[in-house]
Image (cartoon, helix red, strand yellow):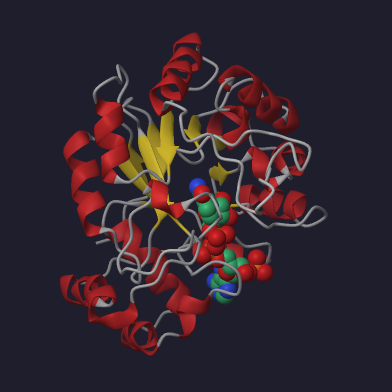
Amino acid sequence: MSPPTHFKLNTGAQIPAVGLGTWKSEPGEVRKAVSFALKDGYRHIDAALIYGNENEVGQGIKDSGVPREQIFVTSKLWNTHQPNVKEGLQKSLDALGLDYLDLYLIHWPVRLVPNDTSDTLPTNPDGSRAVDRSWDQSETWRQMEEVYREGKVRAIGVANWSIPYLEELSKKWTVVPAVNQVELHPFLPQHELREYCAKHGILLEAYSPLGSTGAPLMSDPDIRQIAEKNDVSAATILLSYHVSKGVVVIPKSVTEKRISSNKETVTLSKEDLAVLDELAAKGKAKRINTPLFGWDLGFADWYGSVRSK
Ligand SMILES: NC(=O)c1ccc[n+]([C@@H]2O[C@H](COP(=O)([O-])OP(=O)(O)OC[C@H]3O[C@@H](n4cnc5c(N)ncnc54)[C@H](OP(=O)(O)O)[C@@H]3O)[C@@H](O)[C@H]2O)c1
């Protein structure tokens, strides 16, 4: 059986199962990568204001010649814009050169307060991030619901939200998040979060599916073994893991050959999925993306006990 090409959001809209990630895609590279991907058949681009390259992502979309309405475009509200969602959204729309988004996510459940050190990644004198710990995320969500109702974004969701955060928000939401985009791969399978999101009709999206820069998960011996057995690359196994489980995956690449092959997923057997699902519990648990937002806030739960502050 061929793997699914799309999933359905709780809004009723379809989202392509594989999208192109754009974090750390350098200016000068990302325009070409986006344009190539769209010409090559991708219809889903994952962007964010903080990536600092939405301008070029937008140019790549235009260069491709693919009509806007055929493309699913996601962007994310940066932490410093939490008190003013409209402003953050407009910045992304202007940079991308678009008049609506298909999906808009709260990037982290953390408000950062700009100061003299930075407008985007401000720090306190002790070097920690300038987090506003008193900020109520339900206020950010209320404003997300507002831009959704105004039609500037066709779906709204969150990123990096653990179960306690979602539980708290559920007391106030009138629109259930369509998506929770989190770090997800065999070393961080987040089984409980998966169950929770399924129960509430929130679609999961897997970020850093290859282990982020340099795709380190591809060299894991267990993953390589499954790749050999299926006669595909380790990247194909890592991406197919999600699609086979009903999860959207957004691999980043600026290399044409990789962009092309990353969209070709395969259906994995129950046995292979079970092996991948168990790797973290068998000692390989690892989170790769650990920004300095104050992990004691518990915004993104993970397997294992090591936390960076
Ligand atoms: N919401 C969030 O907080 C959040 C956080 C992290 C990421 N994301 C999103 O998720 C996307 C993906 O995550 P990511 O960028 O961290 O990492 P990733 O997709 O796991 O890995 C990207 C790395 O893998 C390489 N690569 C890609 N395909 C490959 C292949 N077939 N064979 C070998 N190497 C390959 C890329 O190299 P080349 O580019 O040189 O080909 C790059 O170095 C991001 O771009 C972003 O859109 C969201």
Relative to 221, is 106 on the left or the right?
right
Relative to 199, is 240 on the left or the right?
right
Where residue 278 appears, x then y in whole percent?
22, 75
Near-viewer residue (117 or 257): 117
User: Can the viewer see residue 72 in this picture?
Assistant: no
Classify 267 as above or below 105: below
Residue visible at 69% across and 34% down in the picture: 114
> In the picture, residue 254 is in which quadrant?
bottom right
Where residue 299 appears, x then y in whole percent?
39, 46
Where residue 1 appears, x then y in whole percent?
24, 62
What residue occupies the far right of the structure in this picture? 28
Classify 258 as above or below 298: below
Image region (quadrant) for ligand 1 = bottom right
Residue visible at 31% across and 41% down in the picture: 203
Relative to 77, is 63 on the left or the right?
right
Classify 252 as above or below 111: below
> In the picture, residue 177 is in which quadrant?
top left
User: Can the viewer see residue 51 in this picture?
Assistant: yes
Residue visible at 48% across and 34% down in the picture: 105
Where residue 308 appears, x then y in whole percent?
47, 63
What residue occupies the far top of the structure in this picture? 150
How many marks on residues?
0
Near-viewer residue (141 or 149): 141
Near-viewer residue (113 or 167): 113
Near-viewer residue (255 or 214): 214
Residue visible at 68% across and 43% down in the picture: 122
